[in-house]
């Protein structure tokens, strides 16, 4: 590569669809995208591979690029010794999952991004880590030192490198063993919640200490435990965590939506990137918490979140964008933080005083350089007292104040937005819109879900298979099990919100296609990726992490299709997989948040609600109610055939264990029938 007019010539990444790869297109590193050209060169020249995995909104990925990949000396070391490959983990989660596991095994520490892994030409990992500084500091080896040592080891200690790589692969292939034979009883969900409670922070809410993630899947288990057992302590924990998030800096107090995680235990200062999937999962928890409590605080937070997605994360063609960056103007959080002087400039001196007290903005600040992350530090009664006005006037003033601050914020350079449309994440968000629209009686949100799913169906579904990514009219990349599963579940969510049979049919088409591509009948396994020559091995995806796992999501879709009365192998496949996994789920609920609900439905069976000849009143009652394991269908469904019952008249039929109530026509009676059994 050479410089032309002071600008470094573009490398191979300049032709890639991924914004993350394009961000590295002018590094002096001889980058390759993952593909045959790079892998063939490594094999032909017997060169080790330096694999770097990240994503566009990752703050430390940007730091490592500035410090190391833009450094000509470090780039020269990389180019001399390695085939250098850059991967967007959002495009290739299959590679990321394998090599994240490898780094965690090798380092005995948690993984993360940027991920840096050194591979043999046969793609076996033998050394790795996450972020490396450019020079030795704080007990971490500098990246230049790492490169030199790894290159020397590969040249001079080939047998030892091969041994380590072999040991890592053997460990990876046995990392997630089957644990069959567990006895799962009626108390399974409550027992799982008790184990999760050991990690719950009773002081500040949420799980663990800093950094603190939303972990809505764990909260969902506790909400389900409350519904089954009636113990108010479970509901109290969920409310404590969600209330702290709503009030905290992790929540964008002006623009809506939630940042990635809190850097402290109190939810005050976030890591500022915004991920589509985080907001989808939080929205669903807010909907369910509102269903349980009726507290408009949760409806308002959900409405604000979805409005943010509509305003900031929606593509004109119908899909949802992937992420917003943590950085702008070269600094993390610069778009979101405030000084007292900025408050006064936006609001004037009089209003700024009360607003600063409400949002916790002072001279010291709670973030870098004396700036402050906004959080709610006072309730409305205290704010009314500060202003000397009644509550209604204060509510109106606060909304006007937030709008003024938001418009002032829009004058700043915005963080970068990754405009990839990812099938799986779009499924999660479309499902959230459908659930919220049905629960809150908002047809526009149901329509927004339909627009997103129509885009996926029309643009990403092609000749019987799904593609994962769309950007700028280009649709590419074979989809993974998680894409099929999340879009199928969203389609069923939309069917339940609209009773439009097209979406129930699309869900079935997706699941059938997924079973053809990912189901291994001999091993009773649902693999994450299609069969491919560029993977060192093919693995399942069983652990629920920042998003639900591919396996638990597909199992959920299988059980929902079976519950809806669709004929197929869905239940039998679910039986085989769940029989293998049930003990692992029971033993370690922290790693199996969504699995717990799936196992619960598998064990207890669904709650089927069949609505016959209803003007939507009864269906709306169901949609507003918290009913785990619910499958809501209308007259056109074949559900009555599965249940062995034929509806005798209009109304709603609530069916559990193949036993149905008589037709219910009164919404209040229906609400009582839907309460926990």
Image: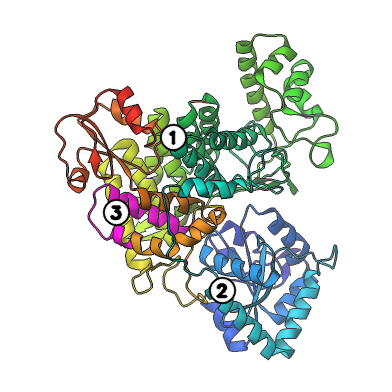
Q: Viewer-proximal residue, 33 or 173?
A: 173
Q: In the figure, residue 266 lies in which quadrant?
A: top right
Looking at the rendered image, the disc whose residue lies closer to the viewer, 1 or 2, is 2
Q: Viewer-proximal residue, 237 or 563?
A: 237
Task: State whether residue 382 is above or below residue 447.
Answer: above
Q: Secondary structure at mark 3?
A: helix
Q: Residue at x 24, y 41 (%)?
A: 659
The residue that label 1 is drawn on is 436
Q: Quadrant of the N terminus?
A: bottom right
- Mark 1 or 2, nearer chain start: 2
Residue 285 seen in render: yes
Q: Secondary structure at mark 2?
A: helix
Residue 606: numbered disc = none
Image check: 453 left or right of 303? left
Image check: 261 left or right of 306? right
Q: Position of residue 314 (x, y in %)?
A: 49, 42
Q: Viewer-proximal residue, 591 or 539?
A: 591
Q: Residue at x 33, y 62 (%)?
A: 573
Q: In the figure, residue 30 lies in which quadrant?
A: bottom right
Q: Residue at x 30, y 24 (%)?
A: 669
Q: Position of residue 378 (x, y in %)?
A: 71, 23
The residue that label 2 is drawn on is 172
The residue that label 3 is drawn on is 508
Q: Which residues are magenta?
A: 549-574
């Amino acid at each position: 590569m050479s410089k032309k007019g002071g600008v470094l010539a573009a490398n191979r990444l300049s032709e890639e669809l991924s914004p993350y790869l394009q961000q590295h297109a002018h590094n002096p590193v001889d980058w390759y995208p993952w593909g045959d050209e790079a892998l063939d060169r490594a094999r032909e020249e017997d060169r080790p591979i330096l694999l770097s995995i990240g994503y566009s909104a990752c703050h430390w990925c940007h730091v490592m690029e500035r410090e190391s990949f833009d450094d000509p000396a470090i780039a020269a070391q990389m180019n001399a010794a390695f085939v250098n490959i850059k991967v967007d983990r959002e495009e290739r989660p299959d590679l990321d999952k394998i090599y994240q596991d490898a780094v965690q095994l090798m380092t005995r520490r948690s993984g993360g991004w940027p991920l840096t892994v050194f591979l043999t030409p046969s793609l076996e990992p033998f050394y790795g880590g996450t972020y490396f500084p450019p020079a030795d500091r704080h007990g971490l080896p500098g990246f230049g030192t790492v490169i030199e040592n790894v290159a020397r080891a590969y040249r001079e200690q080939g047998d030892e490198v091969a041994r380590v790589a072999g040991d890592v692969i053997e460990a990876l292939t046995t990392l997630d063993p089957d644990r069959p034979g567990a006895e799962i009883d009626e108390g399974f969900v409550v027992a799982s919640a008790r184990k999760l409670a050991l990690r719950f922070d009773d002081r500040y809410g949420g799980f663990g200490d800093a950094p603190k993630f939303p972990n809505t899947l764990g909260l969902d288990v506790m909400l389900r435990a409350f519904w089954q057992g009636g113990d108010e302590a479970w509901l109290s924990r969920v409310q404590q965590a969600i209330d702290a998030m709503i009030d905290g800096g992790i929540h964008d107090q002006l623009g809506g939506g939630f940042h990635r995680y809190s850097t402290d235990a109190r939810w005050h200062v976030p890591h500022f990137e915004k991920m589509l999937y985080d907001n989808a999962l939080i929205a669903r928890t807010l909907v369910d918490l509102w269903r349980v409590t009726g507290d408009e605080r949760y409806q308002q937070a959900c409405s604000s979140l979805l409005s943010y997605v509509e305003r900031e994360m929606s593509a004109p063609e119908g899909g949802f964008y992937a992420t917003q960056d943590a950085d702008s103007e070269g600094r993390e959080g610069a778009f979101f933080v405030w000084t007292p002087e900025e408050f006064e400039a936006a609001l004037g001196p009089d209003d700024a005083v009360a607003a600063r007290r409400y949002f916790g903005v002072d001279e010291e600040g709670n973030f870098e350089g004396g700036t402050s992350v906004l959080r709610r530090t006072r309730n409305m009664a205290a704010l009314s007292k500060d202003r000397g006005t009644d509550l209604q006037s204060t509510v109106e003033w606060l909304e006007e104040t937030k709008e003024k601050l938001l418009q002032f914020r829009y004058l700043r350079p915005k963080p970068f937005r990754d405009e990839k449309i990812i099938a799986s994440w779009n499924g999660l968000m479309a499902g959230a819109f459908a659930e919220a629209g049905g629960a809150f009686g908002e047809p526009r949100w149901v329509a927004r879900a339909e627009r997103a799913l129509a885009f996926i169906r029309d643009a990403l579904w092609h000749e019987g298979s799904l593609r994962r990514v769309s950007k700028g009219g280009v649709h590419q990349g074979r989809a993974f099990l998680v894409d099929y599963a999340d879009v199928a579940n969203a389609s069923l969510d939309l069917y339940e919100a609209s009773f439009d049979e097209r979406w129930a049919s699309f869900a079935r088409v997706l699941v059938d296609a997924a079973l053809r591509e990912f189901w291994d009948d001999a091993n009773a396994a649902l693999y994450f990726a299609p069969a491919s020559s560029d993977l060192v091995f093919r693995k399942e995806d069983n652990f629920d992490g920042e998003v639900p796992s591919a396996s638990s999501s597909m199992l959920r879709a299988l059980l929902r299709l079976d519950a809806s009365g669709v004929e197929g192998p869905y239940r039998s496949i679910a039986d085989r997989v769940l029989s293998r996994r049930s003990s692992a789920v029971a033993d370690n609920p922290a790693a199996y948040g969504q699995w717990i609900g799936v196992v619960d439905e598998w064990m207890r069976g669904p709650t089927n609600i069949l609505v016959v000849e209803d003007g939507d009143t009864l269906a709306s009652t169901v949609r507003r109610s918290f009913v785990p394991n619910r499958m809501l269908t209308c007259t056109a469904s074949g559900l009555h055939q599965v249940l062995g019952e034929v509806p005798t008249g209009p109304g709603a039929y609530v069916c559990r264990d193949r036993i149905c109530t008589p037709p219910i026509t009164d919404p209040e009676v229906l609400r009582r029938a839907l309460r926990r059994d």
